[in-house]
Amino acid sequence: MKRRLLLLASAISATGCSVVGDRSGTEEPKFETIARTGELEIRHYAPRLAAETTARGTEEEARTAGFKVLAAFIFGANQGKREIAMTAPVTQASAEKIAMTVPVAAQPTSPGQWLIRFYMPSNYTADTLPVPNDPAIRIVTVPGETLAVLRFSDSRSAEAMAEKRTELLTALPATGWATAGDPVDMFYDPPWTLPSLRRNEVAVPVRKIRFQNI
């Protein structure tokens, strides 16, 4: 219990967040907004460094389990016992290949494998980042990519996230952009943030559709 309380206190301090959703001072990966179409934002992200782990369980169980593993790493469970600043967002994606012809809302909420990522502060490189003690954590460079993003607040239950993924993919064909990968969920606030003040996003890699003259 004492360890959990210390971890919670460290998380509040590291994220600069509170119950009212203040994210001041929390670094986010830089991106360029290419376009806005309806409620969707098209962003281009440069390559970025991340710590990731694969967690098993239902969507929400895996999110919690993966967060704990990665939080321990940035709070000092690494070679050098160095604390690493928390950034946003924490991302979650299915670690199992998703057929894009299957409605996202129909994806199983039964136990599966999920990829959880923390993005590392920009002052680190793969050579200067402390090495995790836990072999379940991988340090990776996420390639640059263009994402279509839908932002929302309130619930981030498995059902709510599935609904928003469906909304994103349903809206995409009319925008001139096509999917180029599988959806990812992005969470910017800790669970204790007031729901109406949370920043949640669902995103999917995209490519520009090139129309041919007939």
Image: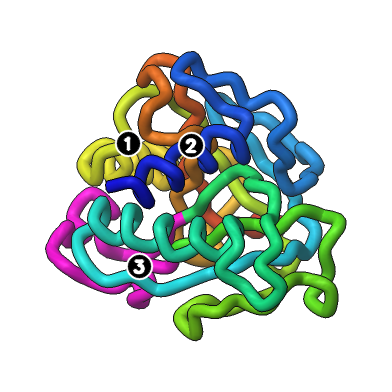
Q: Is residue 151 left or right of residue 29?
A: left
Residue 74 spot, x, y in % from top left: 60, 59
* Residue marked by disc 3: 114
Magenta span contains residue 209: no
Among all residues in the image, which is located at the extreme left? 110
On screen, residue 71 above or below 176: below
Q: Quadrant of residue 40?
A: top right
On screen, residue 172 above or below 118: above
Q: CA distance from mark 1 to mark 2?
A: 22 Å
- Which stretch did the figure color magenta? 92-115
Q: Please tell me which residue is depicted at 56% across the width and 27% down the height of the picture.
A: 17
Tell which of 159 and 188 is nearer to you: 188
Q: Earlier in the sequence, mark 2 or mark 3?
A: 2
Q: Is residue 214 visible?
A: no
- Picture disc at residue 9: 2
Tell me the kind of residue under disc 3: Trp
Q: Earlier in the sequence, mark 3 or mark 1?
A: 3
Q: Earlier in the sequence, mark 1 or mark 2?
A: 2
Q: Please tell me which residue is depicted at 61% across the width and 43% down the height of the picture.
A: 88
Tell which of 51 and 40 is nearer to you: 51
Give the SS element for disc 2: helix
* Residue marked by disc 1: 156
Between marks 1 and 2 in the image, the one whose residue lies nearer the viewer: 2
Image quadrant containing the C terminus: bottom right
